[in-house]
Amino acid sequence: MMLGIPGAGKTFFSRQFAQEYGAIHLNFNKIKDVVFGNVEIDSHDEKKIHDLMLMMCEDYLKCSMSVIFDAPLLTMASRRALREQTRSKDLEHLIIWVQTDADTAFERSANRDRRQIDDRYSTSISDENFDAKVAKFQRPQHEEYVVISGKHVYNTQSRAVKPKLAELGITETVAPKPELTKVLPTPTINTSRRRIQPQRRAKIISRRQRKVI
């Protein structure tokens, strides 16, 4: 599950990690955009989206699919429900805490550009809303987590996460997608069809000569 204040860079990492490992990327902003549109929503509507994501996650886990839960899990209570869901199925989970300084995070979250892939479903938020979410943030306590920088490139972030996944045994079920290589059979050419019998060749030449003449 992803953790970080708005604009920390949660979707930047989770989108690429899901692509690399073939995991399901449950994106809070994408679901919110479909349900409510490109608008800011209050905490009551946020809970609706969160509950919907938990239901979707439940179905994916039943199908033995790995899930990246990309949502504003700012409080310990909001993370508890997801932890209990995984533990009830005897599954491992890991919090990926994306840390970015507040000034940079606010600049990102207040100036979303929906032309950019990671901002496509995001809504620019006001400074009041940003401050409220930062004040609400609760750091992990007695929870498995790993910290990455929201200012690093994806490869650097991924290298920081993979050892923790291996330690928890999660990488045994989440393996990188293999390169897709097309193995084509060596074509066989039937040269007998291309042979022109001498008698027919003479007729073809004769026709060509008549046309030229």
Image: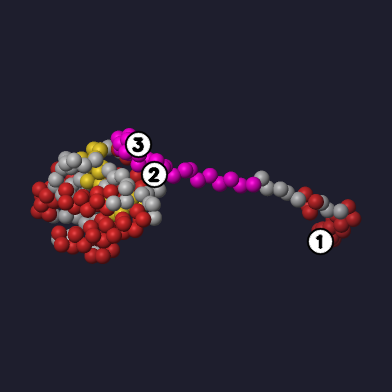
Secondary-structure class at tag 2 = loop
In the picture of the structure, the residue carrying the numbered disc 2 is 174
Q: Give the residue type that dot 3 points to.
A: Ala
Residue drawn at (61%, 47%) of the image? 184
In the picture of the structure, the residue carrying the numbered disc 1 is 211
Q: Is residue 4 magenta?
A: no
Q: Give the residue type that dot 1 points to.
A: Lys
Q: Is residue 41 above or below residue 185?
A: below
Query: Dot 1: within a 10 Å radius of its alpha carbon, few (fewer than 14), some, or many (20 or more) residues?
Result: few
Query: What separation in Å lies between label 3 and label 2 (alpha carbons)?
Result: 10 Å
Magenta segment = 158-185
Q: Is residue 115 above or below residue 177?
A: below
Q: Is residue 200 above or below residue 106?
A: below
The label on residue 166 is 3
Q: Position of residue 68 (x, y in %)?
A: 31, 49
Secondary-structure class at tag 3 = helix
Relative placement, left or right, of 34 versus 130 is right
Name the image quarter holding residue 46. bottom left
The label on residue 75 is none
Q: Position of residue 92 (x, y in %)?
A: 31, 44
Q: Give the residue type that dot 2 points to.
A: Val
